Amino acid sequence: MPETAVPEAAEATLYRVELPMAVGFFHPAKRRSCSDSLVLRLDVDGASGIGECAPRAYVTGETTDSVTRALRRVPMDAVFRRIRSTDPAALLAELRDDGFAGTFGVGGGNNLLCLLETALLDLLGRRLGLGGERLVPRDGAPAVSPPALPVSQVLDLSLDVEEFLDTRGPFHFVKVKAAHDIGRDVRTVTAIRERLGDEVPVMVDANMSWTPEEAPGHLSSLCDSGADFVEEPLTKGSWAELARLRARTGIGIMLDESVCTPDDARTAIESGACDAFNIRVAKNGGPVTAAKMIGLARRGGLAFQIGVQVAEVGPLINTGRALAFAHCDALTVEAGQSDRFFADMVVSPRPGVNRSTNTISPAPGHGFGLDLNDHTAPWTVLRRTEGDTIWRRVPFPAPRTKEHA
């Protein structure tokens, strides 16, 4: 029998996902007790893709509300027409070269572009039968990826160091979220070093909480106690102060909030402000730009980490992991803690971490390997159907949780 043609139809659905977290996550910049992500589903002529962003105002100045407003201004009918009219392989090649903004001529903040780019890459991966690692640029990356990658363990302020060391191993790389008491941080690093020895790298993440006057003493004390890196010690973009700080101390500096765009990355390198970047898919505007920033790090002689936003809910998790396997020479990889944070998730299968080895494996399947499940429905907020001129509100049947971060 002849194949039944799929009627032409296109639709975009937006979800605002505020899942309550079973355990909170605390650091000097924020306290978080539920997720705050936007998830976008694109459906075009029988093919679908899902994307995610996790805007954080203190990182890029964006919020879920501001990204939602920006999404309403995106010419979705033009996006649908381009997806329909362009060969999928050719569109993927263009997207990998130019990102969503360059491919579609759409401007906007990093999280808006990430939301659209991850959804479209997922759709194209499903159409072309490609896994996530083959959807992201990998120029300059190792030719062969391993079957599994070790991941960091993160000690935030909700957990004491003894319980962390007793329950969260084995350890490959440890990140400590700084307290407001440098004495506590020194004692924490000392305890980690006493238990784990010198082989496991240790980094303290200050989340922009130190002044230029106090930072040299803090870094010196942490270096003496055994820390290898400090992440984002000063207010973001403090290029000259960071360069002076780096020259005065013997500890590596990783930048996160300061390095959101390729221009930021170039400035950091030219200023001699750091030794490594923390690359995060949503913060950096999607996996295409994130991969380009990894390339800038390599060419500048810097290391890089594949990081996460706290409380990612699905597509971002597997997109970050695809980026990590495509660029497996990262200093370390963060896998997140969705298995600890959420009783139920809006995607299936649940992104997993092998907690007996603290490693991750590539996601199976095509695209980024996830589908939305029944837990998604209560978080639906907007829908845009091809030919309609506006996004339509969708009744919200479940009470929203209140974000405490």
Image: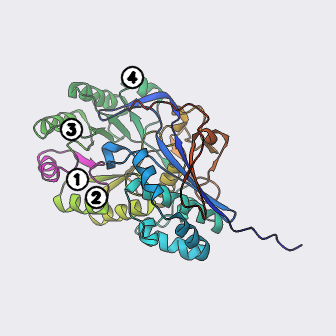
Q: If you read the primary sequence from the N terminus, does the residue marked by circle 4 or circle 3 appear first?
A: 4
Quadrant of the snapshot with the C terminus: top left
How many other residues sit within 10 Å of disc 2, few (<14), some (14-19) or many (≥20)?
some
Q: Find the distance from the CA under tag 1 to the CA under tag 3.
A: 16 Å
Q: Amino acid at mark 4?
A: Glu
* Vertical placement of residue 73 versus 213, above or below: below
Q: Under tag 3, what secondary structure?
A: helix
From the image, state whether disc 3 or disc 2 is nearer to you: 2
- Label 4–label 3 contact, CB within 8 A: no
Q: Which residue is mark 2?
A: 302
Q: Relative to 326, is 140 on the left or the right? A: left
Q: Amino acid at mark 1?
A: Cys
For the question of whether residue 120 can be seen, the reply is yes
Q: Nearer the viewer, residue 67 or 28?
A: 67
Q: Position of residue 151 (x, y in %)?
A: 46, 44
| Magenta span includes 248 | yes
Q: Amino acid at mark 2?
A: Leu
Q: Relative to 153, is 398 on the left or the right? A: right
Q: If you read the primary sequence from the N terminus, does the residue marked by circle 4 or circle 1 appear first?
A: 4
Q: Which label is found at residue 162?
A: 4
How many other residues sit within 10 Å of disc 3, few (<14), some (14-19) or many (≥20)?
some
Q: Under tag 1, what secondary structure?
A: loop
How many other residues sit within 10 Å of disc 1, few (<14), some (14-19) or many (≥20)?
many
Q: Under tag 2, what secondary structure?
A: loop
| Magenta span includes 139 | no
Q: If you read the primary sequence from the N terminus, does the residue marked by circle 3 or circle 2 appear first?
A: 3
How many other residues sit within 10 Å of disc 4, few (<14), some (14-19) or many (≥20)?
few
